[in-house]
Amino acid sequence: MPDHQVLELERFLPYRLSVLSNRLSQAIARNYESRFQLSITEWRVLAVLGRYPGLSASEVAERTAMDKVAVSRAVNRLLDAGRLRRETHEDDRRRSVLALTEAGYAIFDAIVPVALAYERALLSSLDAEERAVLDRLLDKLAGNGAQAEGVLLAAEG
């Protein structure tokens, strides 16, 4: 049998982060789905627009690093449900922007305390210093993403 590269998947950081993210997202998504009939993508759209009203669907996709098609579908479902409204940008009539409706804000305002309580429970095993270190490390890794992606691109070439 030929020798093969070894990848300890359970120690491979991208895999570990992905598994953790999926587990956390699925746990909280069950709550959003059962209480508000929201998918993960729909919640993320509401969350971003609750914080940054007036973004286009493309800007929401960029800010969340989600697929543009998935964001577009979520936006359409939220528009159909009356949770979002689409308006023409005041400075650029060719551009449409999104904002939460009162129904959207009602859901947003109901979910935020649940989301923050979930975060507190998740972080409860860490002391203040560990939480600060985790925050700095996540920021550092996020900032290094472009450089790491360059390694992948170089490997393709």
Image (tube, grey):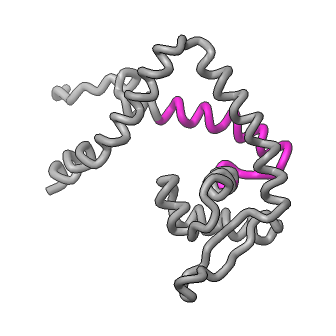
For the point 64% across and 28% down, the residue is 119
Q: Is residue 49 magenta?
A: no
Looking at the picture, how far across and down is residue 8, in whole percent?
33, 23
Quadrant of the rendering where the N terminus is positioned: top left
- The part of the image, by quadrant, that contains residue 50 is bottom right
Above or below residue 56? Residue 20 is: above
At x 23%, y 48%, the residue is 152
Residue 87 percent coordinates (x, y): 68, 78
The number of callouts visible is 0
For image coordinates 50% across by 20% down, the residue present is 131
Residue 58 left/right relative to 75? left
Image coordinates for residue 97, horizontal then vertical, percent: 61, 73
Q: For the C terminus, give its image quadrant.
A: bottom left
Q: Is residue 87 left or right of residue 7?
A: right
Tell me if 135 is positioned left or right of 80 in this view.
left
User: Which of the 4 image quarters holds residue 114?
Assistant: top right
Magenta stretch bounds: 18-42
As drawn, 6 above or below 35: above
Coordinates of residue 5 in the picture (x, y in percent): 21, 29
Nearest the eye: 38 or 142: 142
Please tell me in which quadrant of the rendered image residue 16 appears.
top left
Main secondary structure found in the magenta portion: helix
